[in-house]
Image (tube, helix red, strand yellow):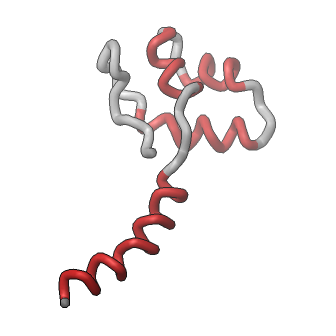
Amino acid sequence: MIIPVRCFTCGKVIGHLWDPYIKRVKNGEDPGKVLDELGVTKPCCRRMFISHLELIDEIILYELKLTPKVRKKEEV
């Protein structure tokens, strides 16, 4: 969904690093080197970036499709 603000394991604030990370990786840079340069050195924090899936765009589509149906049922 959305990158968590803090690492689940150690609590380090990492949310602000997501945009620079994803932009650089999409430009073809190595994810490991990008994380090193951003100062993400702990394995737990690196896991948060490497394993994250951006699903919010897909979930919003279902919300937009389901919302009118729910409203019609409530009106009846």
Residue drawn at x 36%, y 82% is: 68
Residue 64 percent location from the top left of the image: 43, 73
Residue 75 or 14: which is nearer the viewer? Answer: 75
Residue drawn at x 47%, y 57% is: 59
Residue drawn at x 53%, y 33% is: 52
Residue 56 or 36: which is nearer the viewer? Answer: 56
Left or right: 41 as drawn, with respect to 2 = right
On-image quarter of the C terminus: bottom left
Depicted 73 relative to depicted 60: above or below: below
Depicted 29 relative to depicted 42: above or below: below
On-image quarter of the N terminus: top left
Picture mark count: 0
Left or right: 36 as drawn, with respect to 40 = right
Depicted 44 relative to depicted 4: above or below: above
Left or right: 27 as drawn, with respect to 4 = right
Q: Quadrant of residue 21?
A: top right
Q: Quadrant of residue 66?
A: bottom left
Residue 46 or 29: which is nearer the viewer? Answer: 46
Q: Residue furthest right?
A: 28
Depicted 35 relative to depicted 70: above or below: above
Residue 16 percent location from the top left of the image: 43, 38
